[in-house]
């Protein structure tokens, strides 16, 4: 096998199995320098990348891209894209053709595609860019696709908006019939997740005389207490019993589920949450005590959905990263706090802590937008943190994201000057957020104070500053939102001083232990959401040579 494919990792055998000479690319030995260079770049990237080469857009991709196309692999390798993506070719084909003819790159955010990658047309969302790869004479030889799948984020945001809207619509209603009518009206605004939905008595028929779904014999897929998922003519239908006040002792939520989404725990759990929200509203109509139970449900719902937007942190070798999100104990609301941790294409680590103004579904939806925008910008823009925040603010304004937010964006890279000592360089920019805390190897804790700068969203054209500090083994950095230290009965400086005092001497604690320490110390006395990110460079074991 050509040494060009040595970086293919687990795809080496797949590359070996392709008869490249029979493709329009020809034998590997005859590939052009631009093609070989593009393949080398693709295979050495840890981000999902594929090449569409030549007039037929023959596909060459790396390991990370396999997850995006599912069971299209390995047949897709070396095959024309029009054949591989026949079901979506009417969408992406013209985009690829445009890049080839105009040489201009495309940028698409959260594009919806019905892709057949698991045996059915699956609703998928992708953020990607098609860019031209040119030959020595400037002609376009191929197109490179750098992509990320955003399906989980889009579905989470969509379902979050529906659930919050449903909860708000039912919160002040007292009559069971009105509750059911309003709930059905709200649920029918989300045909992507609930193509057909109704709430009826077990044996009731609708106005057209139709019985509850399904109307033909079905096969039980899942039976779990009050929830049954069954298949009727290969269409999944979920039933959930909802306890109601007399004279109707029971109603049933019946939902025909989408044939374009996987019937996984997340989907079933979402519909269960829908049914639970309606059930709690019915119970509240029977007794005033149920109003408190609904509030508890809304709080749990909000926390669950907000956590679904906060993905597990990246854990690069030689570093510890721990995160926490703690909702306010006295409120059943969704907050705008968030954190993030992900790897850059060059292997560097990016950390984010932020807080959108407000404590409602708008703040949560805005938080999700800003978080995803910042993640995309920070990944794609190879600039210092301050410049990344400037691009973020420009993007927010261009896309109409009208919000105020504070944030700290930090990047951690290997300190080349002290690489053998295990040191890292932390660079960061602070947009109106509270200063991080640095815990040194000797146990000293200090605030990384910087000259104050404006919040995101205040005005356009704000110049952001960058700051740097060298982190040696044994160091830890704590990023947090104001819910950790801000109290109504105290000034913020007292809270910051207390935080520094509590972290002093904690140089022997792991990142996870530091998170637990801070939540134990502060969460019970606060009245706001708390988000935490702790980065730590573990000390080198004694006796290990550098």
Image (cartoon, grey):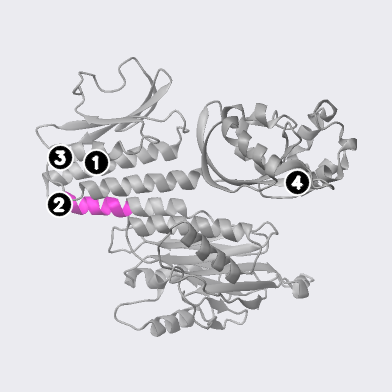
Question: Which numbered tag is attached to residue 289?
Answer: 2
Sequence-first disc among 1 and 3:
3
Q: Secondary structure at mark 2?
A: helix
Mark 3 or 2: the one toward you: 3
Where is residue 256, by image quadrant? Answer: top left
Sequence-first disc among 4 and 2:
4
Which residue lies under the disc numbered 4? 133
Outermost residue, front direction? 102
Q: Secondary structure at mark 4?
A: strand
Q: Residues within 10 Å of mark 2 (few under 14, many from 20)?
A: few
Q: x%, y% of residue 334?
A: 34, 58
Which residue lies under the disc numbered 3? 178
Q: Is residue 296 magenta?
A: yes
Q: Quadrant of the C terminus?
A: bottom right
Q: Is residue 243 above or below residue 467?
A: above
Q: Residues within 10 Å of mark 4 (few under 14, many from 20)?
A: many
Q: Secondary structure at mark 1?
A: helix
Tell me if I can see residue 471 in this picture: yes
Indicate left or right for 370 with 85 as reference. left
Residue drawn 77% across and 75% down?
A: 417
Outermost residue, right direction? 29
Residue stretch rendered in magenta on the structure: 290-300
Real-space Cα separation, disc 1 to disc 4, in angstroms: 54 Å
Sequence-first disc among 3 and 4:
4
Indicate left or right for 20 with 424 as reference. right
Q: x%, y% of residue 254?
A: 29, 29
């Amino acid at each position: 096998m050509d040494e060009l494919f040595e970086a293919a990792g687990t795809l080496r055998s797949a590359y070996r199995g392709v008869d490249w000479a029979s493709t329009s690319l020809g034998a590997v030995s005859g590939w052009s320098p631009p093609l070989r260079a593009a393949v080398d770049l693709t295979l050495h990237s840890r981000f999902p990348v594929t090449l569409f080469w030549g007039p037929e857009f023959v596909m060459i991709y790396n390991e990370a891209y396999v997850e995006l196309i599912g069971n299209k692999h390995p047949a897709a390798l070396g095959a024309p894209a029009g054949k591989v993506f026949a079901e979506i070719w009417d969408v992406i084909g013209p985009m690829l053709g445009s890049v080839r003819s105009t040489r201009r790159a495309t940028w698409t955010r959260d594009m919806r595609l019905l892709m057949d990658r698991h045996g059915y047309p699956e609703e998928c969302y992708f953020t990607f860019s098609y860019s031209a790869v040119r030959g020595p004479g400037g002609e376009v030889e191929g197109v490179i696709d750098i992509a990320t799948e955003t399906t989980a984020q889009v579905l989470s945001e969509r379902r979050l908006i529906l659930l919050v809207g449903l909860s708000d619509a039912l919160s002040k209603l007292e009559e069971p019939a009105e509750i059911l009518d309003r709930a059905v009206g709200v649920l029918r605004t989300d045909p992507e997740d609930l193509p057909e939905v109704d709430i009826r008595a077990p044996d009731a028929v609708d106005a057209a005389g139709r019985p509850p779904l399904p109307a033909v014999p079905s096969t039980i897929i899942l039976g779990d207490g009050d929830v049954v998922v069954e298949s009727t003519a290969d269409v999944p239908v979920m039933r959930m019993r909802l306890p109601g006040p007399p004279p109707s002792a029971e109603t049933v939520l019946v939902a025909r589920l989408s044939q374009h989404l996987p019937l996984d725990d997340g989907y079933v759990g979402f519909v269960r949450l829908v049914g639970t929200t309606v059930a709690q509203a019915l119970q509240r109509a029977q007794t005033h005590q149920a109003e408190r139970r609904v509030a508890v449900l809304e709080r749990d719902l909000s926390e669950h959905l907000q956590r679904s937007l906060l993905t597990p942190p990246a854990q690069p070798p030689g570093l510890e990263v721990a995160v926490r999100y703690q909702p306010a104990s006295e409120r059943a609301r969704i907050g705008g706090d968030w954190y993030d941790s992900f790897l850059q294409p060059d292997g560097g680590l990016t950390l984010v802590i932020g807080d959108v103004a407000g404590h409602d579904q708008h703040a949560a939806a805005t938080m999700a937008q800003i978080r995803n925008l910042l993640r995309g910008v920070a990944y794609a823009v190879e600039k210092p943190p301050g410049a990344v925040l400037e691009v973020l603010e420009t993007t927010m304004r261009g896309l109409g994201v009208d919000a105020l937010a504070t944030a700290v964006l930090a990047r951690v890279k290997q300190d080349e000057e002290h690489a053998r000592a295990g040191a890292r360089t932390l660079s960061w920019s602070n947009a109106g957020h509270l200063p991080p805390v640095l815990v040194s190897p000797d146990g000293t804790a200090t605030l990384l104070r910087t000259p104050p700068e404006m919040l995101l969203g205040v005005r356009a054209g704000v110049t952001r500053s960058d700051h740097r500090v060298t982190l040696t083994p044994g160091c830890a950095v704590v990023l947090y939102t104001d819910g950790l230290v801000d109290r109504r009965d105290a000034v913020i400086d007292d809270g910051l001083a207390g935080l520094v005092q509590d972290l002093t001497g904690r140089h022997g604690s792991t990142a996870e232990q530091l998170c637990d320490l801070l939540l134990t110390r502060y969460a019970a006395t606060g009245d706001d959401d708390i988000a935490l990110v702790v980065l730590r460079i573990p000390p080198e074991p004694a006796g290990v040579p550098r």
